[in-house]
Structures are given as structure tokens and as C-alpha cells.
Image (cartoon, rainbow, N blue to C red):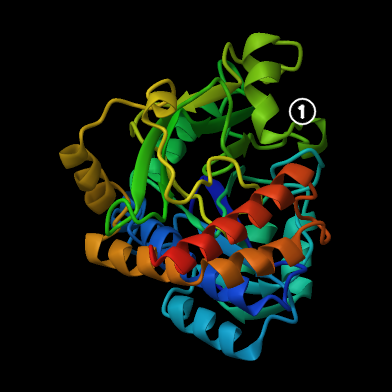
């Protein structure tokens, strides 16, 4: 090993791409388009990277099906190969945030990655992070491959973790939490529509629940990961903030709803989505939206996209057109992928996908698309 891990914490971003779905080419292609548009650039332009030019302030591990089509794999690698802190790993095994225990602190996640085929990324950095996991605080952030994070989000999480977690054995445990969760209080949803050239953006405020994009679990040094309470993302607020029964982190607050930046995450809600909630292409219910949305005018919304998530309007127009013109085959693939291992198996999702296909075909027949 050439050197020790240089930071007081280890921060891992975990992303899944087409796990157990290697034989769905239309879905995979669409998800790669969304990854490049929303996900990749929002992480590459994280502000903490600009302040940490001589070391990696986080490692980004993207797991995909080992049987991912060779052409798609090659294209994916070409996108991330210039960045040694980004890993494409051939594995269908997941740890980290969710209802099951196991993660980077306990060593399960690192072992799986290093025992798998790694198609891109600096393995030495991985080994250093794995070896240092017991002597540093550990942060794990979940990010779906079609979502993005505000460019200041990771910096904000790390700054709070530095103040609230015990990141070294030399730091007194007094007034430090043994573990902590963070999630977005507000986020932005994008849906491809023919209402505008670049689709529809809707800023949502929290309904006292966490979305998956940006959920982060921080674990203090020497804290056993297996003793931390685990819940589905939509249950965290209820269990840790309202009931307090499981709020055993040693702090007054065990779950931080992140309000700065105001819009912490950007989610794409398309025919590729595992769950189909809020996916209604070409349907905009203004009255219903007014009950749930953050009041931000269009001028500030465009600025938030460009500056906050590094998404360009011209790129949005291209993606909007792609998703609409391929919606039938994308939704059909997604329907085939329902109920595969580790994926949604809801009747409501299957029915929503069927309806999306029917609507898209009708629109094509009428010449709308």
C-alpha cells in the first residue's frame, strides 16, 4: 500500500445500474442516457472536488450486471474512465442503506467490490478506503443512476458529519452522535413531455419522508454498523423523527432533513423508473401540483438546473426528444424487468407501464409525437 487514507472520513456513493436486467437493451440504453444527463455531471461538478484537488473526497461505486452487453459496457466505461474515483463493478450484490445490515464499515461492501471484476477505477484507492474503514468515520450515500445531486450537497453533508460524528479515536465522544442519517427536504422532478421542448420540471417539498436520492448514513469511528436501525427510505422520518423510538444515535436529532441547498436532488421520472409514482408523461395536473411543490418561478428553476445540477437546456431538449420517441420500447422493457431479483414487483407499477405504452401508441396514431 503506497499511503494511508488522507481524510478523517470515508465517503462512498453507491449507485446501481441494470442489476439482474442485462437482457433489456432499450431500458439499458435509456438509463445510460439519463445517467450521463442527470447523474454523472452532477457528481463530477461537486464543489468539494474543487477544494480537494490532491485527493478523492469520495469514491463512487456503480454496480451493474456482470452480463451487461459489451457495447453498453464499453460506452459506460468511456464516460467514467478519466476519473479514477469512479468505479464500474460487475456485481449484483448490494449493501448499504436500506432495511438490511451490512456496508462499508463492516467490510462486506468492500470485500464484494474487490472480489468482483472492476471495469474502471483506481483499485489502490479502494484498498486504502477498505483498510481505513475502522479508524475513520464512514459515510454512505445512495444515488440512483437516473438521478442527480446538487453540486454543494456532498460538501454540506461532509461538513455536518465533521461537526457531528466522531471521526477519530482522538475525538471525544461527548456531544458527538454515534450515527446519523441525512436526506433531502426538497427535490426537483423531471418528466419528459410535449408540453415544452425540454420536458416538465416540478420542485417538490418534503412530505415528511425521504426520497432515495441523496440518503446518507454516517457512522462514527468504532461504532458497530450492525446496531444502527434500518428502515425503508419512506419510513425514516416516521421512525427517527416522529416516534423517536429508534432515535438512539446519542444526539437530539438522528435524521437531518437537508434544506440547504433548497433543492438537494434532481430525479428523472420516466418510463425507465423502477416505481412509476409521478410518472405521467404529457399530463400536468396544476391543481394537484400546487399542494406539493416549492414556489420557484421558471427563471430561477432554469438557473437551478444549470448552476445547481450542471444540466444544460440543450441537453435537456435532446433527452426529452429521445425519451418520448422511444417510450414504447423503453416501457415494454421495463415491464419485462418488473419482479426480477431486487426490483419492484407492484401491480400498480405494471399497470402504470401498460397504460404508458397504450397512451404513447395512441399519441403516435394521432400524430402528437
Q: Position of residue 198 (x, y in %)?
A: 29, 57
Residue 91 in the image: above or below residue 183: below
Q: Which of the pair 151/125 is nearer the observer?
A: 151
* Identity of the residue drawn at 76% across and 30% down: 228
Q: Position of residue 165 (x, y in %)?
A: 56, 30
Question: Is 296 placed left or right of 285 in the picture?
Answer: left
The picture quadrant where one finds residue 265 is: top left
Question: Is 162 placed left or right of 4 in the picture?
Answer: left
Q: What is the quadrant of the C terminus in the image?
A: bottom left
Residue 173 shows up from this direction = yes
Q: What is the quadrant of the N terminus in the image?
A: bottom right
* Identity of the residue drawn at 54% across and 65% down: 361
Q: Position of residue 141 (x, y in %)?
A: 57, 46
Question: Is 92 placed left or right of 312 in the picture?
Answer: right
Q: Position of residue 86 (x, y in %)?
A: 51, 69
Residue where numbered disc 1 is placed: 229
Residue 243 in the image: above or below residue 135: above
* Identity of the residue drawn at 58% across and 11% down: 252
Amino acid at each position: 500500500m503506497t499511503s494511508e487514507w488522507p481524510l478523517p472520513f470515508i465517503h462512498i456513493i453507491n449507485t446501481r445500474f441494470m442489476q439482474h436486467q442485462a437482457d433489456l437493451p432499450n431500458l439499458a440504453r435509456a438509463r445510460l442516457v439519463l445517467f450521463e444527463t442527470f447523474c454523472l455531471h452532477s457528481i463530477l461538478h461537486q464543489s468539494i472536488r474543487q477544494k480537494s484537488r490532491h485527493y478523492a473526497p469520495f469514491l463512487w461505486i456503480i454496480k451493474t450486471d456482470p452480463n451487461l452487453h459489451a457495447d453498453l459496457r464499453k460506452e459506460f466505461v468511456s464516460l467514467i474512465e478519466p476519473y479514477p474515483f469512479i468505479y464500474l463493478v460487475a456485481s449484483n450484490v448490494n449493501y448499504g442503506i436500506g432495511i438490511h445490515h451490512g456496508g462499508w464499515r463492516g467490510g462486506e461492501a468492500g470485500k464484494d467490490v474487490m472480489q468482483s471484476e472492476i471495469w474502471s477505477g483506481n483499485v489502490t484507492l479502494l484498498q486504502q478506503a477498505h483498510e481505513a474503514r475502522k479508524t475513520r468515520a464512514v459515510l454512505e450515500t445512495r444515488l440512483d443512476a437516473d438521478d442527480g445531486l446538487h453540486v454543494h450537497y456532498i460538501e454540506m453533508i461532509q461538513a455536518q458529519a465533521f461537526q457531528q460524528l466522531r471521526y477519530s479515536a482522538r475525538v471525544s465522544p461527548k456531544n458527538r452522535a454515534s450515527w446519523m442519517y441525512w436526506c433531502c427536504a426538497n427535490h426537483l422532478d423531471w418528466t419528459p413531455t410535449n408540453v415544452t421542448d425540454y420536458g416538465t420540471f416540478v420542485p417538490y417539498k418534503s412530505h415528511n419522508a425521504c426520497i432515495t436520492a441523496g440518503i446518507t448514513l454516517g457512522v462514527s469511528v468504532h461504532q458497530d454498523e450492525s446496531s444502527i436501525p434500518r428502515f425503508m427510505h419512506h419510513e425514516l422520518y416516521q421512525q427517527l423523527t416522529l416516534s423517536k423510538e429508534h432515535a438512539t444515535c446519542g444526539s437530539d436529532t438522528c435524521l437531518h432533513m437537508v434544506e440547504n441547498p433548497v433543492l438537494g436532488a434532481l430525479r428523472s421520472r420516466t418510463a425507465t423508473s423502477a416505481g412509476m409514482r409521478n410518472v405521467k408523461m404529457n399530463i400536468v395536473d396544476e391543481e394537484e401540483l400546487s399542494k406539493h411543490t416549492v414556489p420557484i418561478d421558471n427563471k430561477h428553476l432554469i438557473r437551478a438546473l444549470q448552476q445547481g445540477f450542471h444540466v444544460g437546456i440543450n441537453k435537456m431538449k435532446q433527452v426529452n426528444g429521445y425519451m418520448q420517441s422511444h417510450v414504447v420500447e423503453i416501457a415494454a422493457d421495463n415491464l419485462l424487468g418488473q419482479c426480477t431479483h431486487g426490483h419492484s414487483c407492484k401491480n400498480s407499477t405494471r399497470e402504470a407501464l401498460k397504460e404508458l405504452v397504450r397512451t404513447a401508441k395512441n399519441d403516435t396514431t394521432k400524430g402528437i409525437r
